[in-house]
C-alpha cells in the first residue's frame, strides 16, 4: 500500500516538498508523487524572485502547473514560501523605505495567495528561516533591516488579511538538534502569540545530517506549542548520511515519534534520489532510489504509519 493510503487512516497529511514542476515531465516521477503523497510543495517556484522578479510582473507558469497537477490528483499544495531567506528580487533587496517595502509585501502576498483556490493551497510558510542558522538572533535580512524585528508580525497579519481561513506557519531549521535555537524559536513564537499575531503553526524543516534528534525532543516541541494552541508540522525532512542503514533507522525513529506525538502534517524534501538536494556529496537522502524503487527508508516510514 502507499504512504498516502496509510497516512490517511491516521488523518496524517503526507507530502513531498522540493517539487520542481519540470520533474512532472517524467511520467514515473508524476505517478509516484500522486500515488504516495497527498500534499506537495514547490522547491523554489513559490519564492519571491521566481514569481515576481520585476515588480508587478508575475510569472505563474511553473506554479500553475504544480497546482493543476495537485488538483487533478486530489492533493493540496503548501504555499512555500511568502518570505524566505533566499531568492528575493533585486528590487526588494534594494529597498530602504519601510512604506514601500510594506506595500510590496502586501501586493506580493495578495497576488500569490489570491491566485489559487484556498482549498488547494490551504497552508502557507509565511516566514521561513527568520533565525540565524546556528541560532543567536534574527537573520538580518532585508525585511529585518528595513522594518525591524516586527516584520514577522507584519507578514503574518498581511497573510491573515489576504486569506482569513489559511493555515499560517513559521518555518525554521535545526531547532530539533540545537537546544538553544529551540528555545529561541519558542520565545519568538510565544511572543507573537502573546501579541495576538495570527500564527497557526510551526513547520520544522528537519533536514537531518548524521543523527536523529534525541528521543523525546520532537514530543516536547509538539507539546510546548500545543500549550500555545499551535500545531507542529514536519515540512522538509530528508536524511543526509553516508550509510543507508543509518538513514533507514533515522527515518524510522523520527516517524515513529512523529506519529506518537500526533504530528498530522509531514512532508519530505523530495522523494527520489534522482533529484537531489544535498550538501553532502554521496548522501542518498530520500525514500526512493534513482529508479523510483522504494528503499529501506520507505519501508521504515510505511511501517511507522
Ligand atoms: C532549497 C532548494 O532545494 C534549492 O534548490 C535552493 O537552491 C535553495 O533552497 N529550507 C527551505 C527550502 O525552506 O526552501 C530550501 O530549498 C532548503 C532549506
Image (spheres, rainbow, N blue to C red):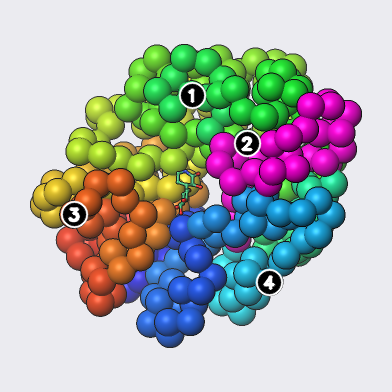
User: What percent of the width, then of the height, locates residue 22?
Assistant: 51, 74
- Label 2 CB, ligand 1: below 8 Å? no
Q: What residue sits right under mark 4 in the picture? A: 61
User: What percent of the width, then of the height, locates residue 2?
Assistant: 35, 71
Please tell me the numbered disc located at residue 282: 3
Residue density around tag 3, few if under 14, some if 14–19, many if 20 or more, within 10 Å? few
Regarding residue 193, the answer to whether it shows in the image is no
Q: Residue at x 51, y 57 (%)?
A: 43
Regarding residue 284, the answer to whether it shows in the image is yes
Decide which of tag 4 and tag 3 comes sooner along the chain.
4
Q: Residue at x 66, y 51 (%)?
A: 49
Q: What residue sits right under mark 1 in the picture? A: 132
Residue density around tag 2, few if under 14, some if 14–19, many if 20 or more, within 10 Å? many
Residue density around tag 4, few if under 14, some if 14–19, many if 20 or more, within 10 Å? few
In space, the residues marked 2 and 4 are separated at their CA atoms by: 23 Å
Quarter containing the C terminus: bottom left
Q: Secondary structure at mark 2?
A: strand
Amino acid at each position: 500500500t502507499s504512504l498516502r493510503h496509510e497516512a490517511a487512516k491516521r488523518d496524517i497529511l503526507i507530502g513531498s516538498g522540493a517539487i520542481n514542476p519540470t520533474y512532472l515531465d517524467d511520467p514515473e516521477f508524476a505517478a509516484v508523487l500522486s500515488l504516495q503523497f497527498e500534499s506537495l510543495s514547490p522547491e523554489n517556484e513559490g519564492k519571491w524572485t521566481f514569481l515576481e522578479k520585476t515588480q508587478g510582473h508575475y510569472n505563474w507558469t511553473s506554479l500553475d502547473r504544480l497546482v493543476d497537477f495537485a488538483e487533478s490528483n486530489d492533493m493540496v499544495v503548501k504555499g512555500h514560501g511568502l518570505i524566505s531567506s533566499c531568492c528575493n528580487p533585486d528590487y526588494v533587496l534594494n529597498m530602504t523605505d519601510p512604506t514601500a517595502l510594506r506595500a510590496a509585501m502586501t501586493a506580493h502576498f495578495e497576488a500569490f495567495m489570491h491566485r489559487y483556490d484556498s482549498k488547494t493551497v490551504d497552508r502557507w510558510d509565511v516566514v521561513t528561516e527568520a533565525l540565524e542558522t546556528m541560532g543567536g538572533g534574527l537573520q538580518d535580512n532585508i525585511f529585518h533591516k528595513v522594518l525591524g524585528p516586527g516584520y514577522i508580525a507584519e507578514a503574518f497579519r498581511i497573510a491573515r488579511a489576504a486569506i482569513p481561513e489559511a493555515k499560517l506557519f513559521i518555518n525554521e531549521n535545526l531547532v530539533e538538534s540545537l537546544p538553544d535555537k529551540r528555545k529561541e524559536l519558542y520565545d519568538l513564537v510565544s511572543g507573537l502569540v502573546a501579541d495576538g499575531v495570527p500564527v497557526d503553526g510551526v513547520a520544522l524543516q528537519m533536514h537531518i545530517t548524521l543523527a536523529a534528534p534525541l528521543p523525546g525532543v520532537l514530543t516536547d516541541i509538539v507539546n510546548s506549542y500545543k500549550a500555545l494552541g499551535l500545531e507542529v508540522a514536519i515540512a522538509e525532512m530528508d536524511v543526509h548520511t553516508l550509510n543507508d542503514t543509518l538513514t533507514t533507522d533515522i527515518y524510522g525513529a523520527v516517524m515513529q515519534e512523529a506519529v506518537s506525538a500526533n504530528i498530522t502534517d509531514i512532508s519530505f524534501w523530495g522523494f527520489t534520489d534522482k533529484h537531489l538536494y544535498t550538501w553532502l556529496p554521496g548522501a542518498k537522502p530520500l525514500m526512493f532510489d534513482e529508479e523510483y524503487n522504494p528503499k529501506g527508508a520507505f519501508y521504515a516510514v510505511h511501517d511507522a504509519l
